[in-house]
Image (tube, helix red, strand yellow):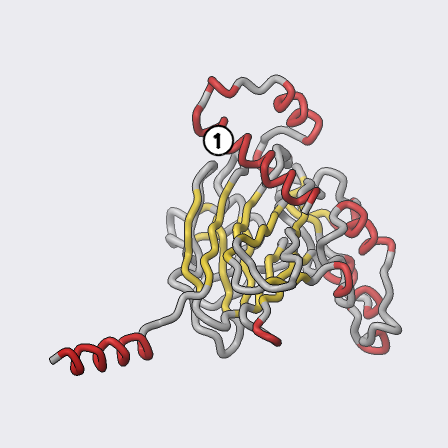
Amino acid sequence: MATFQLITLFILLLTSPVFPATFTINNLCSYTVWPGILSGAGTSPLSTTGFSLQSGESLLIDVPAAWSGRLWGRTLCTTDTTTGKLSCGSGDCGSGTVECNGAGAAPPATLAEFTLNGAGGLDFYDVSLVDGYNLPMLVVPQGGGGSENCTSTGCLVDLNEACPLELQVTAENGGACLACKSACGAFGDPKYCCSGEYATPDTCKPTYYSEYFKTACPRAYSYAYDDGSSTFTCASANYVITFCPAPLASKKSGIQNPAAAAATTANFDPSSSNQEAISYYYSLLLMVIFLFH
């Protein structure tokens, strides 16, 4: 009987799904964010492809072995009362539902990209602005081993506030900037898209527009061949992905601009709200990790 039980246990271990990592997804924005997830070709889908996170909420997701894919945030999502379809002001995946069901983000959108257990058993990850920007985002590896530096990466600032006019995506009534296009998305020029005769690292170089993103977010991808300063590796880590990690916000939801946010931070009263205090001090901790890691 003992031998049979051992064999059964061995079979279960072989056939059970392996979850080598977890993603903890936090929303520290002062408004609701609808994260979307797209698994890469040939990799197992996660338990969800889209969901909503109210301000201050978190969700933990198990990630299977050798997973690759991308994660982003959708903003200003509403459901049509006639059709029942969901649509979002930025990052919309076009599924018409909270779940993205295998669809990716419509640019512009800030992307967190992962390849877990890749070459040499390493995780490769980055935060990309190649398809434009819509939200501040931070990726922090936790518990990683090996000789890799497991560096935190992301874009901590609100680029919508100072987005060049020609790259802005605004509300239909011409209001605040909702997202900031890439130059490729705005103009379709091969020199910005790294396509055609510009499809190699030697011919596709940084531009005025990619430098705008790179200066503000030096660890994020700013154009297609920005690998050297934008791709990071770790081994056997879990990952914390946080929207709005710093006390910054954009006008797209009628909330404070960076200057006003700074003033609010200076006058913050931790006793006013336990949830706000937790989010505030957690955001400061993430900022310290990002700056000094």
Residue 24 lies, in percent from the top left, at 47, 51
**Residue that sits furthest to the left in the current view:** 1
Please report the residue visible at 58 percent of the width from the left and 31 percent of the height from the top: 254
Does 180 sit above or below residue 114? above
**Can residue 186 be seen in the rendering of this structure?**
no
Q: Tell me the crowding category of disc 1: few under 14, some 14 to 19, or many 20 or more residues within 10 angstroms, Cα based.
A: few
Q: Which residue is mark 1?
A: 278
Please report the residue visible at 53 percent of the width from the left and 34 percent of the height from the top: 30
Residue 206 lies, in percent from the top left, at 85, 60
Asked where in the image residue 250 lies, by quadrant, the reply is top right
Q: Secondary structure at mark 1?
A: helix
Report the front residue among 66 and 100: 66
Report the front residue among 237 and 61: 237
The N terminus: image quadrant: bottom left
Asked if residue 193 lies left or right of residue 241, the reply is right
Please report the residue visible at 27 percent of the width from the left and 80 percent of the height from the top: 11
Asked where in the image residue 69 lies, by quadrant, the reply is bottom right
Residue 245 lies, in percent from the top left, at 59, 40
| Mark 1: amino acid | Ile
Please report the residue visible at 81 percent of the width from the left and 66 percent of the height from the top: 189
